[in-house]
Image: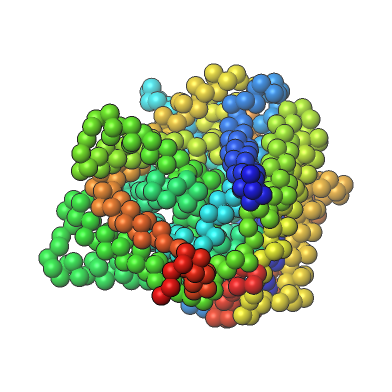
Amino acid sequence: MKQPWAWVGWLVATLVILSITRNPLYLLLVLLCVVIVGISVQQSSPGFTRPFSLWKLATWIILLATIFNALTSHFGTTVMFTIPGKLPLISGRITLEAIVYGATNGLVLTGMLASFAVLNIALPVRDMIGLIPRAFFPLAVVSSIAVTYLPTTMRQFRQIREAQAIRGHQMRTLRDWLPLWMPLLVGGLEHAMQLAEAMTARGFASPSMPSKGATLYPRLAMILGLLLLAGGWILQLGDSETAGLILLLVGAAFVLGGLWSVGRKSHRTSYHRQDWTWKDGLGLGIALAVLLLCTLSVPMLGKETLFYDPYPSITLPAFNPFLGAVLLGLVAPSLMTGRLRDQETTGNEAVHPAGS
Amino acid sequence: MSEETSKNMKSSAFSLAIYLTAFLSGLLVLLYPFFLPAISPQTGFASMRQGQMPVMMTVLLGICLLVLLFESQGTVLNTKLIALLGILVAINSALRFIETAIPGPGGFSPIFFLIILVGYLFGGRVGFLMGALTLAVSALVTGGVGPWLPAQMFTAGWVGMTAPILKPLARVASSTLQRKKPLNDNVEIVLLALFGLAWGFIYGAIMNLWQWPFIVGPQNQSYVSGMGLVSTLQHYLAFYMVTSLVWDIVAAAGNVLLILALGKPALRALRRFHQRFGFRYETGLSVASRSHERGITE
């Protein structure tokens, strides 16, 4: 599975499921799927190194969330022990319910972090920039420049630091950063000037870019959409949940429709377009199916088992094997990964306005 | 009035309407715990739907952010600003990269310094883009993409967008104090430092709102459905004092120190380049035809 949109579909399905369930059994199952996909993606991306260890981070998150909740939330009936004295926040009963709730929160956070980490390994930065919608082509170019110039900035910073160190510069106070910071900033600005000249010389930002006057109707749709979203949000918080949700959907459609309408006017070219394969289609289809089955009320699946609250007295979480089987669908990308990082050298994408 | 002028006026009115509606909608999403009692006195809100709220908040904030980004990008439809913004975002993302590798104390982050200066000098829209894109690009390169990103981009964008409000203040302060130029610079830096101080706390307070309703904690700090506005504010204040105040004091102090230590020369350099970037490209044909119109022969 290499198509960025298929990965986005998988990510959305995973995040929504992690958000709607507090049942630790289902959470563990989802986390297991994410870990399996992560391992398979890692194996398909030789040479990719993560900036931090996810295992260590997960341990810390679950541990901290558990301790924090146990120490600060003294609800629940199953008392494990009591912290004596009058320490603010901490003193009081430590309950099993608070420990389980904290650990559950930690599992949710870990699952979210892990699924984003998988996406970060699976998709090169250039593919992620390629996901920016057409309506945002100037921002896609800005992001592209920033990502391309970042390693140069880091290299420049090292060179400036070495040059200043040779001159005997020492870092004692905050003002000692000035001889490092100013050359970095001024050098960057000079580079921006050269880049702007080069872009203009190559015909970028030609008069054929859509002007603001040409986008009045889409912008009107966006204003309407935002008003509907605000109204829908207030309604669904109140007693009219269904009406609110409908307004929210209509509002979102207005905003996204406006953006789509503007985006149609900008032309995008790719050196190597990432075509859809049957694996991408299948991966996306499975992710969407899992998402729908978990969010809609399907009789056999027992959606109510997704909800679990250990308070006030802890009980064993319910588990529906059919729903468990559905959740296992999130492991599908691990069966469809090829050599993902091969595409990094071919995924260069240029975004430019029509006619330029 | 020419058709072009009328179109521009209409476009500016649309712009203002979009900024206001997107900003207010974003605030409605973030501040819902405070006005919920007024629209829904129910107490069973914290059950099944509490799991859906973070997703809904992320999606709605994301949509507001998309609209704000779309409207702001109208200012960077020229190569100079695209190049400038790209490079400045890269520099700021490098600072965040260094911060991720060597974490500073508490909530200290070096990125707001440049966001504030750029917003102050280049205007609110460029400031908004600088804040939002810094968070987005640095999240891409440090693997920090997550459900918190729209809220971070939204808030950091507003740091840059609100910076130009200091300009009239700086003018008034300078004229009131009848200062000469070097001292005017000091007034400017002090104002920017105070602005950084304020945003150090506001940024933390807004980011807390994203998660506070879903955290179970001591009874006097947690969000409880059905509470009145004053009680909700009291609970949030207690939560903020206990969990975030020290963290945000470090963040605010970091902003102040960075602006006081590095702000003046950075502002001077940015101002010089702001003038250098003020030129306009014109094609040879149009220059020749204008010269011809003015009767200049070369």
Along the line of sight, the residue nearer the viewer: A7 or B16: B16
Pick out the residue farthest to the right: A299
Residue A131: x percent and y percent?
A: 63, 64
Q: Between residues B93 and B244, which one lies in front from this camera angle?
A: B93
Q: Is residue B287 left or right of residue B197?
A: right
Q: Position of residue B68 (x, y in %)?
A: 58, 47
Quadrant placement of the C terminus of chain A: bottom right
- Which of the 4 quarters of the picture holds residue A152? bottom left
Side (left or right) of A253 relative to A169: right
**Viewer can see residue B134:** yes
Can the viewer see residue A62?
Answer: no
Q: Is residue A146 above or below residue B249?
A: below
Q: Is residue B152 left or right of residue A328?
A: left
Judging depth in this view, the residue of A21 and A97 nearest the camera is A21
Residue at left 69%, top 21%?
Answer: B41
Residue at 28% across, 28% down: B176
Q: Quadrant of residue B253?
A: top left
* Rendering coords of residue A165 (x, y %): 17, 67
The structure residue drawn at horizontal position 77% and vertical position 70%, both measured from the top left corner, is: A282
Question: Would you place residue A123 above or below residue B27 in this image?
Answer: below
Q: Check the image and tell me how it is coloured.
A: rainbow
How many numbered discs? Answer: 0
Most distant residue in the front direction:
B295
What residue appears at the point 77 percent right and 76 percent down from the top-left corner?
A278
If the image is split into quadrants, where does the N terminus of chain A sit? bottom right
In percent of width and height, residue B92 lies at 39, 57
